[in-house]
Structure formats: structure tokens, C-alpha cells
């Protein structure tokens, strides 16, 4: 038998995955070691996940989870604690990784107008806090756990105030009081807005009447100068016009909000738990290693 026929028999046509397996490219232990060495570089991980279906599956199941754990260990533990199938989060680990690292930008919608669209981008650093998230929940729903980032600030041409873009995620959203209320009140899903992280349909919290005063106070915005959406998987994204906070304003005022827009047919008011405040968790994209001869990639994790 010729050497050519032997080669064909060993590597039949279209058997790329088998060839990769022999070379170790999809060996999970090797992949883990490689990405630990490059500090779980999200740009490199995004490119790796595009190489083949096998690598995409490994990245989706394993690598994105470890990236999230490397960037926000305390937040990840809180999000999976007590949740059924705790090794998963709403939308998947690749979606959470994108939410942690990527500012979604801004486009006009029916409750919030901008004179120009703002494209999304990797946020160099972000701080997520459950204390901030608590400010986005009316008093009836503060048993829910929500992490929200500090706003990513953008100067907008023709507008005196900076635009703030923020994002967040619920723990176990399918069992949350917030979701129960949205469904119980039959709040309609938005027609023209989708979650920028998982692509799911969203509720407008302005339309639902579930934006407490503590939200715009926490952001340093004005009443009525913000909008945020929550998708069916529990991801939050929103926008606001930022104004400097007065020096005599403190966090104690944040708990004095009223339950604006919450109808009586929602669940009865829950007892405040007096949870300790959180200084939040700083998250960095991390340095990009130029292993492939390319500069930083502009596309978000997929």
C-alpha cells in the first residue's frame, strides 16, 4: 500500500476534529493551562472559540466559566449559590463573560433619546456591586439579588451631561420577585429592543413603573433621565444622563425611596433584611497577548 493511501486511511476526508485531537488542540487540560498562562485573555478566547465546533463547545462549557471566575470570583460564587444547576447562569457563561467585560453602547428608544448612537466596546475596568443593584430594586423586591456596574461614562456631542451606560445581572431570575411581578402584571415585552448580551426579549422597567428613586440617585442622574431593561434571562442594561452628586448626599438616602409604580396586585411588601453593604468587585479585561500577530480585537466575546 502506498504511503498516500496510508495517510488517507489515517486521516479520512473531513475528519478535522480527529486530527486536532491527536495534536492536542482540543485537549481540555492543555487548553486550561494555555489560558491560565495568558490570564484568560477574552480576545484570544473569542478567536479560539471560532476555530471549530469542538473548540466552540469546550469554550462555551468550560473556558468562559473559568474566565468569569478569574475576573469576578466573589460575584460568580454569589450568582450560583443556591441556584439549581449552579454551574450554569442565565444565557450561559459566554454571555456572563460578555456582560462583565463589554459596555453595550446606546441607541435611542421610546423612553430615552440620544442624538447619535454609541457603539459598544470593551470596558477597560468595571465595578459591579450588589449594593448598587439593590438601588435598582423597589423595596418590595429587595430580596432579589442583583449586581449592577458603575456607569461607563461617555461625552456626547451637543449634550452638556455625560451619558452613562450600565449593565447588571440577577441571580436565579426565573425565581425572582421582580420577574413574578412583571409577569403577574402582564407587562409587555419590548418590540424593538433586545438584550445586547444574550439576544433575548426585554421588559422596559420604565414602562413597568418599577424604577425607584434610589436608582437615579445611585447613578448620579436626574429623575426621569434614565431607562433600563431586564431580559427574560435576567440581564440588565440601561442608560442615564449623569450629573455631579451634591457633597451632602450619602447612601443613607438611598433607602428612603418610595415604591413608585408598584401596583397592589404584586407581592406584599417584604421585610427588609439589612444586608451589609458591598464595596463591589473590580473587573478588568486584562492585557491582550499578541500571540497570533494581531493587535487587540474589537469584537466582543461570543
Image (tube, rainbow, N blue to C red):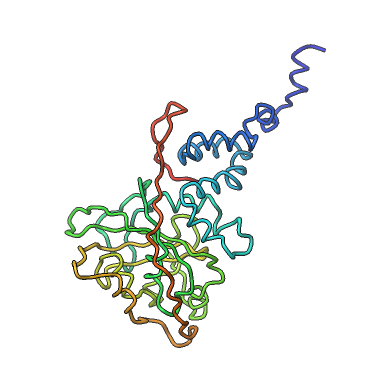
Q: Which residue appears at 52% of the width and 72% of the height?
A: 176
| 36 lies left or right of 152 | right
State the image coordinates of residue 169 (x, y, percent, origin top left).
46, 61
Which quadrant: the N terminus? top right
Does 150 sit above or below residue 226? above
| 222 lies left or right of 269 | left
Q: Which residue appears at 19% of the width and 70% of the height?
A: 248
Tally of numbered discs: 0
Residue 7 occupies which quadrant of the picture? Answer: top right
State the image coordinates of residue 254 (x, y, percent, origin top left).
32, 73
Residue 131 occupies which quadrant of the picture? Answer: bottom left
State the image coordinates of residue 130 (x, y, percent, origin top left).
42, 64
Closer to the camera, 139 or 78? 78
Closer to the camera, 116 or 37? 37
Residue furthest to the bottom = 264
Residue furthest to the right = 1
| 278 lies left or right of 108 | right
Does 139 sit above or below residue 244? below
State the image coordinates of residue 116 (x, y, percent, origin top left).
26, 54
Q: Which residue appears at 36% of the width and 48% of the height?
A: 125
Amino acid at each position: 500500500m502506498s504511503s498516500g493511501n496510508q495517510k488517507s486511511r489515517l486521516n479520512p476526508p473531513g475528519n478535522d476534529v480527529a486530527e486536532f485531537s491527536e495534536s492536542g488542540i482540543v485537549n481540555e487540560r492543555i487548553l486550561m493551562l494555555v489560558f491560565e498562562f495568558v490570564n484568560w485573555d477574552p480576545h484570544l478566547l473569542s478567536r479560539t472559540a471560532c476555530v471549530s465546533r469542538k473548540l466552540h463547545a469546550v469554550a462555551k462549557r468550560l473556558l468562559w466559566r473559568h474566565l468569569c471566575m478569574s475576573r469576578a470570583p466573589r460575584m460568580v460564587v454569589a450568582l450560583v449559590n443556591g441556584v439549581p444547576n449552579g454551574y450554569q447562569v442565565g444565557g450561559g457563561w459566554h454571555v456572563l463573560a460578555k456582560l462583565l467585560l463589554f459596555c453595550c453602547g446606546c441607541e435611542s428608544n421610546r423612553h430615552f433619546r440620544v442624538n447619535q448612537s454609541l457603539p459598544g466596546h470593551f470596558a477597560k475596568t468595571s465595578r459591579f456591586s450588589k449594593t448598587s443593584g439593590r438601588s435598582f430594586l423597589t423595596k418590595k423586591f429587595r430580596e432579589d439579588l442583583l449586581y449592577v456596574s458603575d456607569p461607563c461614562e461617555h461625552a456626547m456631542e451637543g449634550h452638556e451631561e455625560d451619558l452613562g451606560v450600565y449593565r447588571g445581572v440577577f441571580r436565579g431570575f426565573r425565581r425572582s420577585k421582580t420577574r413574578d411581578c412583571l409577569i403577574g402584571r402582564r407587562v409587555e415585552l419590548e418590540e424593538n429592543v433586545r438584550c445586547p448580551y444574550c439576544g433575548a426579549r426585554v421588559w422596559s422597567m420604565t414602562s413597568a413603573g418599577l424604577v425607584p428613586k434610589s436608582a437615579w440617585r445611585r447613578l448620579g442622574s436626574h429623575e426621569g433621565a434614565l431607562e433600563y431593561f431586564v431580559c427574560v434571562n435576567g440581564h440588565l442594561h440601561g442608560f442615564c444622563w449623569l450629573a455631579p452628586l451634591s457633597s451632602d448626599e450619602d447612601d443613607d438616602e438611598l433607602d428612603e425611596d418610595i415604591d413608585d409604580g408598584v401596583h397592589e396586585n404584586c407581592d406584599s411588601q417584604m421585610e427588609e433584611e439589612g444586608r451589609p453593604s458591598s464595596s463591589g468587585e473590580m473587573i478588568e479585561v486584562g492585557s491582550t497577548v499578541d500571540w497570533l500577530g494581531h493587535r487587540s480585537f474589537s469584537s466582543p466575546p461570543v
